Image: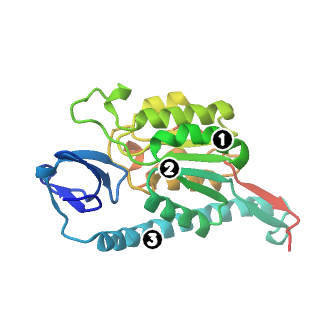
């Protein structure tokens, strides 16, 4: 086994494919290929996955494309409803243009980040993405927020519970939740109004309660389950396309994520979408 190998764990029934991030003596640090899980395992517990990394990502891309198409349909339907209300207020499509909320997305996985940015681009959401280790996110936010001036901040990467620390209310039981909490605190200190800046934070099994207490509007994971790599993006997209006059339909949005309300939770939050008048050529 070496760094970069794609492996599965025998003790978990070979359920999740991982990439070996690094090897520490007789233990490997693992990052999930399809879920935002950070794990470790003895080298003796690992065997090569039955598909190559390229094959795994082709399959992942196909599933992600299905999710993206569904998301595009949801956005189109939401915009149609909104424009219908505006038309009844004597404004027509020819008079208006869309301005979705701007997203600042920090991700601890460069492949996931690329896919997330593709989703934002296809949905015409102004977005800025940065890959950096979870431990560097808080410090980076202190510098970038005043420059980026986003409406929505996504703080995500990989996380997980330590095997020997099963107190789910103790931050020390988590591999990266304390980094996410610090990053959320920085973002919320920058903008204290929870409707002026929507914060979406966490990854697989993250400390949901601590993230909300730190100031996140939406966070993972209430049931400490695995979440799909695109779940935080789905929440960000719907926040970006919900009118500033309305609140994000929390249950509806979360039910459209792969992990559902057990994977991501949150509270009533005003949207970031604005409809402009006098369309520009």
Quadrant of the rendering where the C terminus is positioned: bottom right
Residue 64 screen position, x and y as percent: 42, 67
Q: Secondary structure at mark 3?
A: helix
| Alpha carbons under labels 2 and 1: distance apart | 14 Å
Residue under the image location 59 percent in, 69 percent down:
122
Is residue 244 something that shows in the picture? Answer: no
Q: CA distance from mark 1 to mark 3?
A: 33 Å
Q: Are marks 3 and 2 in contact (CB under 8 Å)?
A: no
Mark drawn on residue 132: 2
Residue 75 x/y as whole percent: 59, 63
Query: Which callout, 1 or 3, points at the residue further toward the start of the chain?
Result: 3
Residue 253 shown left or right of residue 51 in the figure: right
Of tags 1 and 3, the one toward the viewer is 1
Q: Are marks 1 and 3 in contact (CB under 8 Å)?
A: no
Point 34% across, 38% down: residue: 223
Residue to which mark 3 is pinned: 65
Q: Which residue is mark 1?
A: 143
Q: Please tell me which of labels 2 and 1 falls first in the chain.
A: 2
Does residue 42 appear to the left or right of 181 in the view shown? left
* Distance of label 3 from label 2 (alpha carbons): 25 Å
Task: Note whether 173 is above or below 133 in the view shown.
Answer: above
């Amino acid at each position: 086994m070496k760094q970069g190998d794609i492996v599965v764990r025998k003790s978990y029934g070979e359920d999740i494919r991982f990439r070996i991030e690094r090897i520490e003596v007789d233990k490997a640090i693992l990052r999930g290929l399809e879920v935002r899980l950070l794990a470790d395992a003895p080298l003796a517990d690992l065997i090569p996955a039955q598909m190559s990394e390229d094959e795994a990502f082709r399959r992942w891309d196909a599933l992600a494309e299905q999710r993206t198409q569904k998301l595009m349909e949801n956005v189109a339907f939401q915009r149609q409803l909104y424009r219908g209300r505006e038309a009844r207020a004597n404004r027509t499509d020819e008079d208006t243009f869309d301005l979705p909320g701007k997203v600042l997305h920090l991700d601890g996985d460069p492949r996931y980040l690329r896919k997330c940015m593709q989703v934002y681009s296809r949905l015409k959401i102004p977005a800025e993405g940065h890959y950096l280790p979870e431990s560097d996110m808080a410090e980076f936010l202190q510098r970038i927020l005043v420059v980026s001036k986003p409406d929505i901040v996504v703080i995500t990467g990989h996380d997980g519970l330590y095997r020997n620390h099963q107190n789910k209310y103790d931050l020390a039981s988590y591999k990266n939740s304390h980094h996410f909490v610090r990053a959320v605190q920085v973002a919320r200190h920058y903008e204290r109004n929870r409707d002026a800046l929507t914060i979406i934070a966490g990854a697989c099994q993250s400390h949901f309660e601590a993230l909300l207490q730190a100031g996140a509007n939406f966070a993972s994971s209430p049931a400490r389950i695995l979440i799909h790599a695109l779940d935080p993006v789905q929440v960000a997209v719907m926040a970006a396309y919900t009118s500033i006059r309305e609140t994000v339909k929390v249950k509806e949005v979360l039910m459209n994520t792969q992990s559902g309300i057990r994977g991501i939770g949150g509270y009533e939050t005003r949207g970031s979408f604005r409809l402009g008048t006098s369309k520009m050529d």
